[in-house]
Image (tube, rainbow, N blue to C red):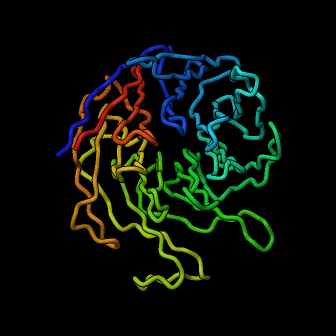
Amino acid sequence: MGRLNLEHTLQGHKGRIWGVAWHPKGNVFASCGEDKAIRIWSLNGNTWTTKTILSDGHKRTIREIRWSPCGQYLASASFDGTTAIWSKSSGEFECNATLEGHENEVKSVSWSRSGGLLATCSRDKSVWIWEVAGDDEFECAAVLNPHTQDVKRVVWHPTKELLASASYDNTIKMFAEDALDSDWDCVATLSSHTSTVWSIDFDATGERLVSCSDDTSLKIWQAYHPGNDAGVATPDKQTVWKCVCTISGQHSRAIYDVSWCKLTNLIATACGDDGIRIFKETSDSKRDEPTFEQLTAEEGAHDQDVNSVEWNPVVEGQLISCSDDGTIKVWKMTE
């Protein structure tokens, strides 16, 4: 079995911390919360310190932040209904664009792999796709409304321009651009959870997706493309996403976030029972019927709900978490 070792406990935000996000180089991360501020942290010797505080971009809670793949831009999604784009072009971080259009709280933001597209989602039930049209210029490419409730999370596929969204309507939707008319369409609906889907993450290949829910379970979804060797039917020659595994019984409350490590293939969860748990695919697992085991459970990882977890994209086994308890923790997983 494995161990999750606590390396650092960091404070600075006032109130609950909603989100943490690693810079693509893995040597810096950003955090955001109900104090309407973004903090950018870097390693100074052996300690993480706040390098910059960005506090003039939003009027309400900041729910999520995400770095662009090039690492030059930071996007922040806020309950004030806007998404801010920050960049360091002048040497200091400043807000260079504010994306408006959602009717109320923006819950999540995500950059496509190329960095040319940005997705946002909101309590207004919509998913918006924005095109990066030039320096600090963003144009709305699509407003998508297939969800019937609050949309909690948007995540781009690691290699393709395929977007996944998770919602309070218990479903996950996939979106892709139609090559013929350049319209964005909902190309798949993934239904199996019995309550809100809080978060989703692709594995390194993008052939699998993990989802976590208010129903206290994790689900693993497998992509089946037209002509697949498993014999899974693909109507209209569209890729089908099938739930191939349900992981349940380990979490006692809602699972708010999940992160699938692109380096180690480990899955980390953030739970409303104050715990962080790590899962690994078993050695005798089958592609179409995978099995996962819990490597470790850090039951009292935080004093209150754990809101977000994210694996470092460069440093193997390093994980950050944040919580309603107002702390950020940096962990190291050893197997």
Q: Residue at x 40, y 46 (%)?
A: 214
Residue 4 picture quarter: top left
**Residue 13 placement, left or right of 266:** right
Residue 1, given in percent of the width and then of the height, sits at 16, 46
Residue 302, given in percent of the width and then of the height, sits at 32, 26
In the picture as drawn, the residue positioned furthest to the left comes out as: 1
Residue 75, visible in the rendered structure: no
Task: In the rendered view, tell whether residue 35 sits above or below residue 114.
Answer: above
Residue 135, given in percent of the width and then of the height, sits at 81, 38
Q: Nearer the viewer, residue 149 or 266?
A: 266
Q: Residue at x 64, y 51 (%)?
A: 112
In the picture as drawn, the residue positioned furthest to the front comes out as: 45
Residue 71 picture quarter: top right
Q: Say how many tags the image has.
A: 0
**Residue 236 placement, left or right of 200:** right
Point out the image quarter for the C terminus. top left
Residue 179, given in percent of the width and then of the height, sits at 75, 71
Q: Nearer the viewer, residue 284 or 143?
A: 284
**Residue 43 placement, left or right of 139:** left
Task: In the rendered view, tell whether residue 225 sits above or below residue 135.
Answer: below
Task: In the rendered view, tell whether residue 209 sits above or below residue 52.
Answer: below
Q: Residue at x 47, y 61 (%)?
A: 205
